[in-house]
Image (cartoon, rainbow, N blue to C red):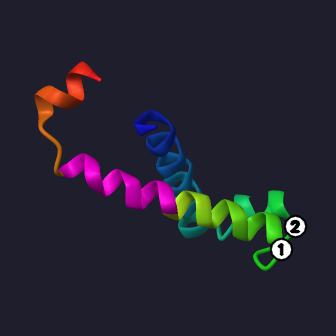
Amino acid sequence: MDTAALLLVIIGALNWGLISLFQFDLVAWLGGGQGAMLSRVIYGVVALAGIWCISLLFRDRREALTD
């Protein structure tokens, strides 16, 4: 679960980088626009992954290495 969440957060970060540098929203482009249901689902999943990754900050490092 941690790996999937980190992958989604990285995708979200790259999308934000594209928006800031080139004013190009890859998720909206792939999903049919910012308001399209597919884009909204992707944005929601990436947000949930970000929330999950907050837990990584508070875990014991030894426990994380053994998982």
Farthest bottom residue?
35
Mark 1 and mark 2 in contact (Cβ < 8 Å)? yes
Does the magenta stretch mainly form a helix, a strand or a loop?
helix
On the image, numbered disc 2 is attached to which residue? Answer: 32
Farthest right residue?
32
What residue do we see at 35% from left, 51% from top?
A: 53
What is the three-letter code of the residue carrying label 1? Ala
Quadrant containing the C terminus in the rendered view: top left
What is the three-letter code of the residue carrying label 2? Gly
What residue do we see at 82% from left, 57% from top?
A: 30
Q: Residue 36 — which label?
A: 1
> Which quadrant of the figure has residue 24?
bottom right
Work out whether residue 38 can be spotted.
Answer: yes
Disc 1: CA contacts within 10 A as few (<14), some (14-19) or many (>=20): few
| 11 sits left or right of 53 in the view | right
Q: Which residues are magenta?
A: 48-57
In the rendered image, residue 2, in percent from the top left (x then y), is placed at 40, 38
Is residue 50 found inside the magenta-colored segment of the image?
A: yes
Q: Is residue 24 above or below residue 13?
A: below
Disc 2: CA contacts within 10 A as few (<14), some (14-19) or many (>=20): few
In the rendered image, residue 52, in percent from the top left (x then y), is placed at 39, 54
| 22 sits left or right of 36 in the view | left
> Which quadrant of the figure has residue 65?
top left
